[in-house]
Image: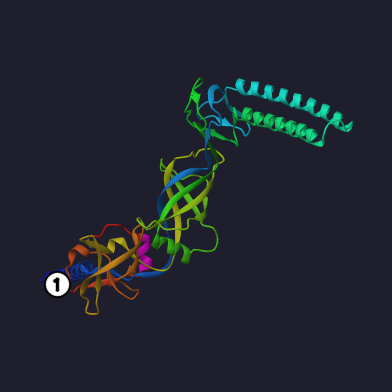
Amino acid sequence: MKYLFVVTGLCVALCHTSCKQKEKQKEEESKLLVTSPLKMDTSIVNEYVCQVRSIRHIELRAQERGYLEKSFVDEGQFVKKGQLLFQIMPKLYGAEIDKAKAEVDLSQIEYQNTKKLRDSNIVAPNELAMAKAKLNKSKAELSLMKVHYQFTEIRAPYDGYIDRLQVRIGSLLDEGDLLTTLSDNSQMWVYYNVPEAEYLDYKTQGSQKKQTVNLLMANHQVFKYPGVVETIEADFDNETGNIPFRATFPNPDGLLRHGETGNVEMTVPLKDALIIPQKATFEVLEKKYVYVVDNANRVHAREITIGADMADLYEIRSGLNANDKILLEGLRKVNNDDKIAYNYVNMRKVLPELRLHAE
């Protein structure tokens, strides 16, 4: 009987201890996690829609009127500087050159005869001067005809790619008619628009060195050669509040072509940024809020302003300071002005374990 009492007492003691442990465990589980914003130097990657342009992209137009006699290139073909591309009915100008040469020969003979007469003091000095002027005029007309003849040959002014041909052999061309375009794709100019606030951050927080950027192409692959921001245009667009940036990208493989689109990825430094997890926020009517814990352990909803959006993190522009305590988890379990029990965790320990969605 005595043994029975001992066993029974032992069971009661174990049961009591187990109950206390469960209550303690339940109490710990009911506590919510609280942290504080972290102030640190960091950087973010901003994306901007961009347009890719050849460093040289020109229109090739007819310089003389006539029929297109020959075309020596095809669409998309790579051509070298000085290569003959088109020829516009040269026979007419060839005949004009022959005529101008004959005029030069005739004027030359007249001038030589007049000079002999002048040397013999048979004619007046003015007659020799007139013969000389006539010779010079005929030579100038010959040079002009040769220029017109050269204009019948359209040659590439630099290495590049031929675009769509706008005319076909036999087409009657007027002076100025578009033949095609030529693109120098050895380097590419990439244009993108930056909002005024981000432009100011870039200028005030960036270094004096030229900014390196990446190009995310339309297939969501990053172009393997980084570019450099070389130019910021002078004026903001009053309608959009943006200012155009221009980055230059090397294009040794010829992958990029004029007219492509994509996104420029630009790293922007943030000095003394105030960082909180995204999962510590909630949204009401398109405004962001956090629950701030006061000294009485009560939570209060407070509106915040987001400065930058990072992976699982927000940079806060206003509404918080580094000493505030904010609710990290359990946002759906509390209401405004609730008193809570919590465990405090340092933000630096939270960062490696972040998950976007609040519990």
Camera-nearest residue between 131 and 186: 131
Residue 317 horizontal side relative to residue 150, left or right = left
Q: Is residue 282 above or below residue 70?
A: below
Give coordinates of residue 82: x percent, y percent.
63, 32
Residue 217 horizontal side relative to residue 8, left or right = right
Camera-nearest residue between 168 and 11: 168
Q: Amino acid at mark 1?
A: Gly
Q: Residue furthest right?
A: 120
The residue beneath circle 1 is 9
The answer to if 53 sits in the magenta stretch is no
Give coordinates of residue 294: x percent, y percent.
24, 77
Q: Quarter-wise, where is residue 273 in the image?
A: bottom left
Q: Secondary structure at mark 1?
A: helix
Predominant SS of the magenta segment: helix
Camera-nearest residue between 168 and 39: 168
Give coordinates of residue 108: x percent, y percent.
78, 27
Total tally of numbered discs in the picture? 1
**Magenta range:** 347-352
Q: Is residue 97 above or below residue 271?
A: above
Image quadrant where one finds the C terminus: bottom left
Residue at x 54%, y 24% (from the top left corner): 66
Residue at x 40%, y 52% (from the top left corner): 47
Image quadrant where one finds the N terminus: bottom left
The answer to if 350 sits in the magenta stretch is yes
